[in-house]
């Protein structure tokens, strides 16, 4: 990662990301879960929230969603820095891989739900795998037997979109 960037969990995702979340999803950012924000330092006292994703603990899995990038703020990123961010997989990729590491010991698997082709492509690069259910993806980061994996997929699928 660039030295002028930081991925961190914040206590209020809405404080940093609600304007661009609202623009992307048409609703306010939820106040639950773990809010990860990708920040870019423009100069010493000017930080831009560039991207956001939520990790929500649900029983023994993490539900991952709400991934969004602040396109207006990204236009302010120095061109060479923007190129490096893209070369490192992009903002959502960085947020996902950071979250997978940060929350690995808190769950048996990570689940996502997406119908957006661009997000889906990034999700797969980050470690998600498709399931037999449309839009439902999973990242098994620890060894689980086939029966346990199938049980978790059935359980999360039964919830519907999240």
Image (cartoon, grey):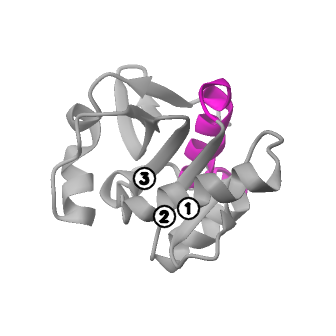
Q: Which residue is mark 2?
A: 157
Examine the image and state in which quarter residue 144 appears. Answer: top right
Instruction: Write the start and end of the magenta stretch as one range.
Output: 84-107
Q: Which labelled disc corresponds to residue 154? A: 1
Q: Is residue 93 magenta?
A: yes
Which residue extends farthest left? 27
Disc ID at residue 65? 3
Q: Residue at (60%, 26%) from the top-left corner? A: 106
Q: Measuring 48% from the left and 48% from the top, which residue is drawn there?
A: 64
Q: Spatial distance from mark 1 to mark 3, Cα to Cα?
A: 19 Å
Determine the CA span between mark 1 and mark 2: 5 Å
Image quarter for residue 141? Answer: top right
Q: Report if residue 30 is visible in the image.
A: yes
Which secondary structure is most common in the magenta stretch? helix
* Relative image position of residue 6 (x, y in whole percent): 53, 29
Q: Quadrant of residue 10?
A: top left
Q: Is residue 152 magenta?
A: no
Circle 3 packing at 10 Å, graded few (<14), some (14-19), many (20+), is: some
Residue 90 at least partly seen: no
């Amino acid at each position: 990662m660039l030295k002028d960037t930081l991925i961190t969990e914040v206590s209020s995702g809405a404080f940093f990301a609600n304007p661009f979340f609202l623009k992307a999803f048409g609703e306010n950012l939820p106040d639950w879960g773990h809010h990860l924000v990708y920040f870019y330092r423009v100069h010493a006292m000017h930080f831009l929230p560039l991207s956001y994703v939520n990790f929500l603990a649900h029983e023994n899995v993490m539900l991952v969603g709400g991934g969004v990038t602040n396109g207006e703020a990204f236009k302010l990123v120095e061109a060479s820095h923007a190129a490096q961010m893209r070369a490192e997989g992009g903002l959502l990729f960085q947020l996902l891989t950071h979250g997978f590491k940060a929350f690995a010991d808190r769950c048996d698997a990570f689940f996502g739900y997406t119908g957006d082709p661009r997000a889906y492509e990034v999700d797969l690069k980050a470690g998600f795998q498709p399931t037999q259910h449309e839009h439902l993806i999973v990242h098994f980061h620890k060894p689980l037997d086939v029966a346990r994996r199938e049980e978790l997929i059935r359980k999360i699928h039964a919830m519907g979109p999240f």
